[in-house]
Amino acid sequence: MIEKKVQDQVNDQIQAEFQSGWLYLAYAAWFEERDLDGFGNWMRIQWQEEQEHGMKFYDHILRRGGEVELKDLEKPTVEAESVVDVFEAVLAHEQYITKRIHSLYDMAREEGDYPLQTLLNWFIDEQVEEEEMAESILERLKMVADDSAALYMMDQELAARSPQKDGEEQQ
Ligand code: MG
């Protein structure tokens, strides 16, 4: 069984993961509108992964006999003038998600909820990867600056990213 207090916060996290996905899909469109389809591909994979994250929490509640409550998603806003702006926002967003995961972990520990702590261990590792990946793309983009040939090369590289399976290293 899952305690109501824990369940409420896990339901909030389902919303946060799907909201992240919605944001990434908006970024995918932003790139694809500008013919940067490799970056678009990278964002589409993020979108898919966020849905998988949401579903991990969804399954967790159901497996423990709880009730899933799906909440409204907000319209995602993309205020970016450059590719660097987008990745600054992506990094900030992932740092925000990391904070949320850590607070959930604190709550699970305080409530003595061991199964949720185990699930969150996976998310804690995942967030290290998410931030590492966003940060490395951002740093490279800053080096590229206004060099469109270099940006094109990066776009080609990101076009090759394919969805990962659980347990695989991020490419
Ligand atoms: Mg996520």
Image (tube, rainbow, N blue to C red):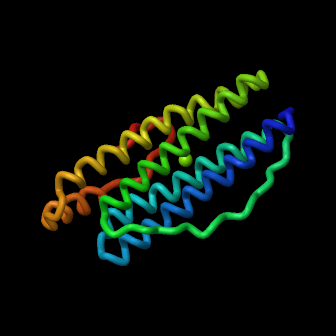
Which residue occupies the foreground of this view, 110 or 22? 110
Q: Position of residue 16 (x, y in %)?
A: 63, 52
Q: Quadrant of the N terminus?
A: top right
Residue at x-position 80% and y-position 50% = 68
Q: Position of residue 144 (x, y in %)?
A: 17, 56
The answer to whether 145 is drawn above or below residue 58 in the figure is: below
Residue at x-position 76% and y-position 57% = 70
Which residue occupies the foreground of this view, 27 or 99? 99
The answer to whether 67 is drawn above or below residue 24 in the figure is: above
Q: Position of residue 91 (x, y in %)?
A: 42, 48
The answer to whether 9 is drawn above or below residue 39 in the figure is: above
Residue at x-position 83% and y-position 34% = 2
Total numbered labels placed on residues in the image: 0
Q: Position of residue 136 (x, y in %)?
A: 30, 44
Q: State left or right for residue 148 relative to residue 14.
A: left
Which residue occupies the foreground of this view, 122 or 22? 22
Q: Quadrant of the C terminus?
A: top left
Residue at x-position 37% and y-position 78% = 33
Q: Single out the residue that lies furthest toward the bottom.
A: 33
Q: State left or right for residue 156 relative to residue 40.
A: left
